[in-house]
Image: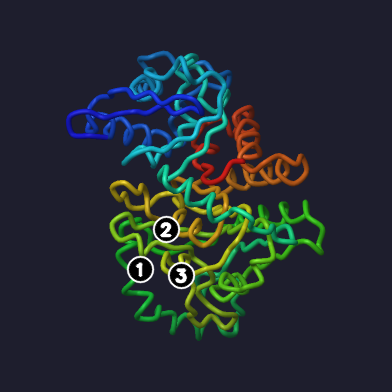
Amino acid sequence: MGQEHSYLWAVTQTSMTSYQLPKGEEIEAATKEFYQLLKNPGNSLYTRGGIQVQPGSASGTANVNVNKLSQILLQPVASQLGNKRLLIVGDGALQSIPFAALPDITKQTQPLLINHEIINFPSATTIALQRIELTGRKIAPLTLAILADPVFSADDMRVTSKSRSIALDQDIPRQLEQSALKRVARNLNRNGWGRLNGTRNEAQAISQLVPASNRLEVYDFDANYNWANSPQLQQYRYLHFATHGFVDSINPELSGIVLSLVDKQGQPVWGYLRLGDIFNLNLPAELLVLSACETGLGKEVNGEGLVGLTRGLMYAGAARLVVSLWEVDDRGTSMLMQEFYKQLLLQGKSPVTALRAAQLNMWQQQQWHNPYYWSAFTFQGEWR
């Protein structure tokens, strides 16, 4: 996206075509508006039957704006899209939106998800570098490791009653935690990390899809920093983290994943897996799922795309990632993830195909039809 003009390149196995788009400022404004519409469950961008609301209502106005963004980005290449798989390498603000939710340029009553499998990458270079790293790598022998439902505060009911009163008096984060994360929490408008009750049901339902001998589950106090750094995780093909995540787009090194912050006695423990920690991990997983909020965002670096949790996890060895672009609904995410793993583990589909199938399943249900519930999660990494 440029100051005077922006450009789109359509690349196939046999051709590369470039198109001139409006200036970056116009695209960025439309993109941010689309993002705000998507992350608000009150905006019905599509009706149950896939027919858009008529202009004139608040929802209709929202749809007009969404269609404008779709026209800008997709109209030039509409004739080339067909039903093909789309690999999106977006610039700037475009990396913050799920293209799966954009209206299909040929049929604006439905999103791109209906006719396309969509993969995202922070940069084209990342594809080549990742394939070099993955060449010849052995697949881990065991299937699934899950971390879910950590304990974030001393007043959590899982902290024993006897020790809770003592812990509450001493529940002052270590100076390092406080100084490093105070500004991040303030930027996110969060007073703390609340328990994600749906993550436990989500994790337990997913785990039942895998024989006990092939899975590892950790909950509560055990879902901690030490576990996330355990070499034992290298034995599992699929890693699933169901907890809070946070992204600092100004100082990406302060981004991270929130694990248990107190022990069984309610005493503070270090529980932030920061971006620096993630870059130093060795996680040769075929798939890593961050069932958490805003884990797909980061800081834009010219020529390199977003630098955030996804880049760190790819560097740590994850071949494929499923991450989120906004603060997701707890119950809706649980439903999506359960369906995703059914498609992956029971139907034998590839991760990217399984995610699309799960999202289509949500789209077809009245309760979860709104893109807010299913489009926050995007696929990044090797699709083959």
The Cα atoms of the two marked residues, 3 and 1, are separated by 15 Å
Q: Residue under circle 2?
A: 246
Query: In the image, what residue type sits under mark 2?
Result: Phe
Please determine whether, in this image, residue 77 is positioned above or below residue 318: above
Q: Residue at x 40, y 78 (%)?
A: 173
Identify the disc placed on residue 113.
none
The Cα atoms of the two marked residues, 3 and 2, are separated by 14 Å
Please determine whether, in this image, residue 268 is positioned above or below residue 294: below
Residue 84 image position (x, y, % from top left): 56, 25
Identify the disc placed on residue 181.
1
Query: In the image, what residue type sits under mark 3?
Result: Asp
> Do tag 3 and tag 1 residues touch (Cβ < 8 Å)?
no
The numbered mark, 3 or 1, whose residue comes first in the sequence reads 1
- Name the element at disc 3: helix
Please determine whether, in this image, residue 382 is positioned above or below residue 147: above
Residue 205 image position (x, y, % from top left): 73, 52
Q: Residue under circle 3?
A: 277
Q: Residue at x 49, y 25 (%)?
A: 14
Q: Residue at x 41, y 38 (%)?
A: 89
Quarter of the figure with the C terminus: top right
Taking 349 as reference, is 176 left or right?
Answer: left
